[in-house]
Image (cartoon, grey):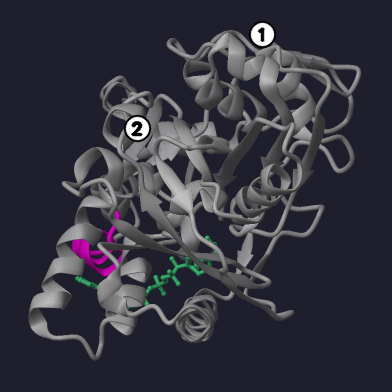
Amino acid sequence: SLEKIGIDKIGFYTPEFYLDLADLAQARAVDPNKFKIGIGQDEQAVLPLDQDVVTMAANASAPILAPKDRSEIDLIIFASESGIDQSKAGALYLQRLLGLNQSARAFEIKEACYGATAGLQMAYDHLAAHPDSQKVLVVAADVARYGLETAGEVTQGAGAVSMLVTRAPRILALSQPTAYFSEEIMDFWRPNYSDTAFAEGKYSTEQYLRFLEIVWHDYQQKTKTQLTDFAALLFHIPFTKLGLKGLCQMTADADQETKARFLQVFETATIYNRQVGNIYTGSLYLSLLSLLQKGDLSAGAKLGLFSYGSGAVGEFFAGELQSNFESMSQLADVETLLAQRQKLTVAEYERLFKQTLPIDGSTLTIDPISQHAQFRLTGISGHQRQYK
Ligand code: CAA
């Protein structure tokens, strides 16, 4: 199809609390430069008890959706690897909280950090296959928890990215074909009984880079695209240093000027990720948002995107910036969200981290903690989460 399909609007939400990783370094007796330079992260969002993936998804989506969008969406895809229920889809809570069209398919998908990309490509296919369908909502919401005093602790975070996918999109038109690869490996996983993730840290970074090599090679073969056709390369960013390694791998044979150009763009594309931390399946799209708001690209610019979800699936795909991308990407007021955040001491962060919902069916009422959020978790009763 010659018709353009892609991202028309992007929304974002991250909790109102954060940890300065220089403070974490000090508490863990680690050189702060290991976190700032070695890992490439400055701060991480901390999830309070009155937020979960459903409220974060709703908080990310509400500001970007006009009444017309709400009535025209006929597919709601909720992507998460930290969902709240083994059976019921987060998409249904989202539909009710946001007042979305009920003549819609609504479901949740999971494949680690790849989920949102699966959702985005599915949204494309849905619109390409159904001429009467107008709009698809794809929301990526996650909280990354590895545990106190673990190697992964510095790569935690929380947040949600919401994307409205339409024809004649005003931000990014998606290109086809794309290149993908999957293989069953144990680099990162979270068994049903655990609320923190297990990771073979070093192995997972090697697999990320191996999958990147495979799909980038395949993409070039399939599309006859060259590195220099792209104005920017975007990556899944579990922590910015890994994206940087991906970039260095892709540009290894390029000249110095090309390397410098991609590096400069990469830095603008990771400004928000450095402050929010890993938001798993939304991380690639938070990097896109950072580039859209902080970069100086022009309409028509071609972006290359690498998505990776442990377990594992990798996909390389491309998109073209549309003429209204600058104004449309301002719908997400990231600066205000970040400026409103409250810095926690390490002790406060540890206390919040240990606060979890009852798992025995007992009732809990949660007094408001988030001051600026439109949607909050107000409690749990009869094994049901209550939202407001
Ligand atoms: N100054 C500057 N740099 C320093 C330093 C200092 N004082 N001290 C150490 N460093 C550097 C090291 O040289 C190293 O750099 P290179 O990677 O370039 O060699 C870097 O800091 C990290 O040091 P270590 O390798 O010793 O790090 P670590 O053992 O503490 O673990 C980690 C790092 C494996 C990423 C760990 O944080 C982790 O397990 N994270 C969770 C897993 C993860 O995010 N994996 C990503 C791929 S999986 C995925 O993508 C899905 C997903 O989102 C989870």
Q: Where is residue 88 in the image (x, y as percent from the top left)?
A: 87, 35
Picture residue at 68% right of the left edge, 42% below the top? 127
- Amino acid type assigned to the residue bearing label 1 in the image: Lys
Residue that badge 2 annotates:
329
Residue that badge 1 annotates:
388
Q: Where is residue 90 in the image (x, y as percent from the top left)?
A: 75, 32
Picture residue at 68% right of the left edge, 48% below the top? 128
Any part of residue 98 in sight: yes
Picture residue at 42% right of the left edge, 31% below the top? 348
- Looking at mark 1, is its residue's CB closer than 8 Å to ligand 1? no
Q: How crowded is mark 1: few (under 14 residues within 10 Å), some or many (20 or more)?
A: few
Q: Element under label 2? A: helix
In-image side of 289 versus 267 (left or right):
right
Magenta region: 30-41
Q: Is residue 36 magenta?
A: yes
Q: Element under label 1? A: loop
Q: Residues within 10 Å of mark 2 (few under 14, many from 20)?
A: many
